[in-house]
C-alpha cells in the first residue's frame, strides 16, 4: 500500500515535470518573482489553515496528508492533460 507521503512525492514530481515541459513553450508564468510570491503565499496559507484545523480537532494529520496527496495528484494530472492537448493523441504523455 502506498502512503499519502509517497503519493504526494510522486505527484509533486510529475507536476514538476509538467511545469518544466510548459516552460519550453511559455515561460512568462514561471518568472522567478512570480513563482516565489505565489509559492510563499500558498505555503503560508495552507500550513496555517491545516495547523488550525488539526489543533481544533476538525481534521487529523492523516486526513490532511490524504487530502494533499489527492490534491497534488489532481495538479499533476492537469499538467499531463494540458501537455497531451498540446502534443495531440499521437503522443502518449506520462509524467513521473
Image (cartoon, helix red, strand yellow):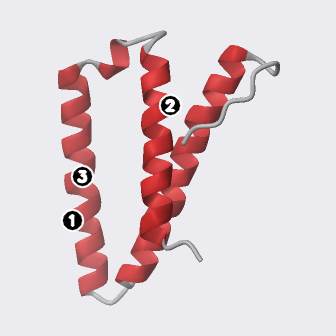
At 57% across and 49% down in the image, what residue appears?
Answer: 74
At 45% across and 79% down in the image, what residue appears?
Answer: 63
The local secondary structure at tag 3 comes to helix
| Numbered mark located on residue 48 in the image | 1
At 56% across and 33% down in the image, what residue appears?
Answer: 79
Residue carrying label 2: 18
Residue 66, image x, y percentages: 49, 71
| Numbered mark located on residue 43 in the image | 3
Circle 3 packing at 10 Å, graded few (<14), some (14-19), many (20+), is few
Question: Looking at the picture, does residue 63 appear above or below residue 91?
Answer: below
Dot 3 or dot 2: first in sequence order is: 2
User: Disc 1 versus disc 2: distance between alpha carbons?
Assistant: 27 Å
Dot 3 or dot 1: first in sequence order is: 3
Question: Looking at the picture, does residue 11 appear above or below residue 37?
Answer: below
Where, quadrant-wise, is the N terminus in this rendering? bottom right
For residue 30, what is the image quadrant? top left
For residue 86, what is the image quadrant? top right
The local secondary structure at tag 2 comes to helix
Amino acid at each position: 500500500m502506498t502512503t499519502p507521503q509517497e503519493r504526494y512525492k510522486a505527484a509533486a514530481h510529475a507536476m514538476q515535470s509538467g511545469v518544466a515541459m510548459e516552460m519550453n513553450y511559455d515561460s512568462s508564468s514561471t518568472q522567478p518573482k512570480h513563482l516565489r510570491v505565489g509559492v510563499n503565499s500558498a505555503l503560508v496559507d495552507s500550513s496555517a489553515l491545516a495547523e488550525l484545523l488539526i489543533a481544533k480537532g476538525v481534521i487529523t494529520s492523516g486526513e490532511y496528508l490524504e487530502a494533499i496527496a489527492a490534491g497534488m495528484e489532481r495538479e499533476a494530472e492537469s499538467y499531463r492533460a494540458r501537455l497531451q492537448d498540446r502534443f495531440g493523441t499521437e503522443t502518449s504523455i506520462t509524467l513521473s
